[in-house]
Amino acid sequence: MTEPTESLGLLGIPLGILAGMLRGSAPFLFVSLGECITEKSGKINLGLEGTLLLGAMSAYAVSYLSAPLVGDFFAPWLGVLAAGFSGLALGALHGWLSQQRRVNDVATGIAMIIFGSGLAFFFGKPFIQPQAPQLFTLDWGAWSSSPQLQSALRVSPLFLLGIAIAPLLHWFFRATRWGLYVRAVGDSPQAALAMGISPFKVRMFSIMAGSFLAGIGGACLSLYYPGVWTERISSGQGLMAVALVIFARWNPIQCLWASMLFGGAQAIGPAFQSVGINSYYYLFNAAPYILTLLIMIATCSPQQTLAGSPGALGKED
């Protein structure tokens, strides 16, 4: 939730949106970067919603259980690693299933949402009430005497990690051999196979790497903001990331800016409520979903090919 900003008047609205952008964009960023890797190889992973939930639960559970052994500082980082590896495991299953003959990407993705969510809900029941140690924050607003500004400028180190990963991924796709393999398979699996590249191995690598990042996105939710584990913690962010990647034209750096846009949109409702404007609250809260719908309507015409779209994306081999 965005902290009260009544004392700032209407200035509290942009401040609240800024706070939401810095806090709420981290899950979008990690999941969209993960989906970008997957889609660059020509596959779509709609199951990242389940991966996000499983990552959030795994991070919270490991942080809570390991705190007595390693302390409150290191426990959340063990949780982040657990979230990543839980996503990796789910990605390995999805990667294998989605490449079997007569298996549809969309159907596999829906199945993985149900499977990942089911695992998270089943194993996460005991961790709904306990309080797990949270990740530390960087206080960029320490220079200010305003408590509202100080609160708005508290930044998670995971957000900074995501900012660093985005240009690294951009470089990876453009300047490395493995990046070339991923792009080659994504554009034409048959041509890649003729060059001696295994589409199966490349896509397995891409889906697993993408799911690892999506799992860390779940850790952003449970160990930073909102910093709890509940069964409704993701609010569909895993599915919205698919639209976000299309909006970013499969460019990791543009995924960063798009994630911040979605994070800010998510904070519009709480920002208005924080200054006492309660009218149309639920409409403002729907901003990220409306944005997702508009992007899908604008970009998903079968008569057009989007710039940057992998040639084999969504097509049967």
Image (cartoon, rainbow, N blue to C red):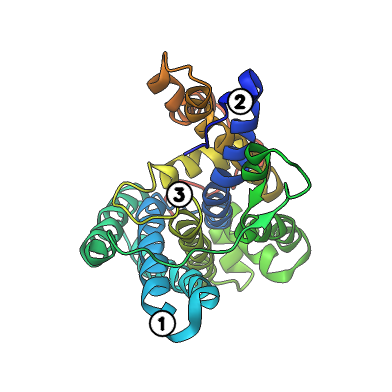
Label 3 neighbour load within 10 Å: few <14, some 14-19, many 20+: few
How far apart are the two marked residues, 2 and 1, measured between alpha carbons? 41 Å
Q: Give the residue at mark 3.
A: 226
Badge 3 vs badge 2, beta-carbon distance below 8 Å: no
User: Can you give x and y, in whole percent of width and height, for residue 244 in the image?
Assistant: 55, 39
Which amino acid does the dot numbered 1 rest on?
Pro
Q: Give the residue at mark 2.
A: 7
User: Can you give x and y, in whole percent of width and height, for residue 279 in the image?
Assistant: 42, 13
Comparing labels 3 and 1, the label whose residue is closer to the camera: 1
What secondary structure is marked by label 1?
Answer: helix
Of labels 2 and 1, earlier in sequence is 2
How far apart are the two marked residues, 3 and 1, measured between alpha carbons? 23 Å
How far apart are the two marked residues, 3 and 2, measured between alpha carbons? 23 Å
Residue ID at (63%, 37%): 148
Disc sitting over residue 292 in the figure: none
What secondary structure is marked by label 3?
Answer: loop
Observer able to see residue 91:
no
Which amino acid does the dot numbered 3 rest on?
Pro
Q: Nearer the viewer, residue 145 or 12?
A: 145
Q: Give the residue at mark 1.
A: 68
Of labels 3 and 2, earlier in sequence is 2
Which amino acid does the dot numbered 2 rest on?
Ser
User: Can you give x and y, in whole percent of width and height, for residue 296 in the image?
Assistant: 48, 29
Comparing labels 3 and 2, the label whose residue is closer to the camera: 2
Left or right: 89 in relation to 185:
left
